[in-house]
Image: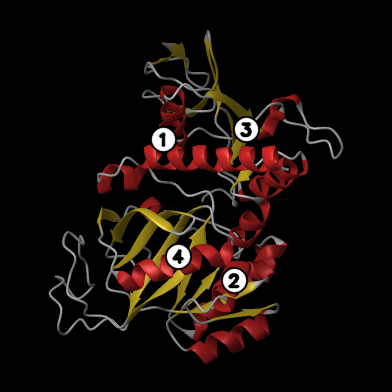
Amino acid sequence: MNIGLLYSRIRKDEKLLLSELRERDHDVTKIDVRKQQFSISEPPEAFDELDIVVDRCLATSRSVYATKFAQAYDVPVVNGPDVAETCADKVKNSLALVEAGVPTPDTDVAFTKDAALDAIEDFGYPCVLKPVVGSWGRLMAKIDSRDAAEAILEHKATLGHYEHKIFYVQEFVDKPGRDIRVLAVDGEPVAAMVRSSDHWLTNAAKGAETDTFELDDRALELVERASAAVGGGLLGIDLMETGYDDSEADHGEASGQTSGDEPRARDFEDYTVHEVNHTVEFKALNDVSGVDVPGVVVDWLESKAQSHSDAETTA
Amino acid sequence: MADCIECGAEVSLHDSLEVGEIVDCATCGAELEVIDIDPVELDSAPELEEDWGE
């Protein structure tokens, strides 16, 4: 097969994928989106003869448009532009999850500082203010007081890009010092891990420790539903444990810090899905889970390309 | 080996280099993007953008 890879930076994740694709003797067309001119009428040469293209753009804005063009050129693309558009924006992501009945943190969106401050006061302290576009835990604010809220809102309104004037205010979820990342293909989990930190942000990019995690039936159900909610594909689904009772659990210090080394007794009420990521990074999962993640992902890519090819033949 | 475009020091490179990959200069700490591999050519890596991520 000829498999295209949309990229602007080759991370370890992309290297793992490229290595697996080449080991299977696929033709690989690397498409640096920074160098392309995306005509609205004629596909660029790089898109010729591709059986499928996988979006690995580092920049969300490029991902949204590049996948849209791939679709316009009739090249099967994963994840597709609709998935990218939903996952790229936290507002759309949250709405999709709510519409699908997937538990997700309570969230208000406001367009002015005053309305945002009212939302923050309604949530009470602490609560969380997030940018609608962004990743790796950047520009996230845990707001502990009205003074802090006023200052952060003023900074965002004055210094920020217009997207920062879309104030995304969310309840603070008192998780047990960790969250859960699940890599899934069309709702089927490939690997899962916990990300633990003393800090309230538990992104691996922020230095959280990672360890394996065994999904229970409820988590499996939510992964499947969250994936479907955004349109399916190769996704990173993030969950937190809610209603955590730290008086009964043995998780170390008061922070709830734990490495998640063993599946534990269920000492929490449920999960909440806070985000679904569409250009998911998986190098940490590959290292920690013992699962050959690029192998499974390429299996899935092959099956997607084959099903598109079969559909075209039938048509 | 290739020269760092920031400080001129030699940058050690691994065997499975990919165009688009980022390497660090051990001498000055600069992040360098591999823009060609035959022969190896390095350029300054782009600065982090706000919409980068997953």
Pointers 3 and 4 within a single chain: yes
Mark 2 or mark 1, which is nearer to you? 2
Does label 1 lie on the same chain as label 3?
yes
Q: Where residue A245 appears, x then y in whole percent?
A: 23, 84
Which residue does the image show at 31% across and 71% down from the upper left? Answer: A217
User: Identity of the amino acid at label 1?
Assistant: Lys
| First along the sequence among labels 2 and 4 | 2
Q: Is residue A267 visible?
A: yes
Of the 4 image quadrants, the one containing the C terminus of chain A is top right
- Tell me which label, 2 or 3, sits earlier in the chain: 3
Disc 3 crowd rating (10 Å Cα; few below 14, some 14-19, many 20+) is: many
> Which badge, 3 or 1, is on the more N-terminal residue?
1
**Which quarter of the figure has residue A45?**
top right
Q: Amino acid at mark 2?
A: Ala
The residue under label 2 is A96
Q: Return the disc, 3 or 4, that comes first in the chain's sequence.
A: 3
Foreground residue, A304 or A148? A304
| Residue marked by disc 1 | A12
The answer to whether any part of residue B29 appears in the image is: no
Give the residue at the far front of this rendering.
A314
Vertical side of A119 occupied by A141: above or below: above
Q: Nearer the viewer, residue A254 or A45?
A: A45
Q: Which mark is residue A224?
A: 4
Residue A120 vertical position relative to residue B21 in the rendered view, above or below: below
Q: Amino acid at mark 3?
A: Asp
CA gap, disc 2 to disc 4? 14 Å
Residue drawn at point x = 27 percent, y = 73 percent = A176
Q: Which mark is residue A51?
A: 3
Q: Quadrant of residue A58?
A: top right
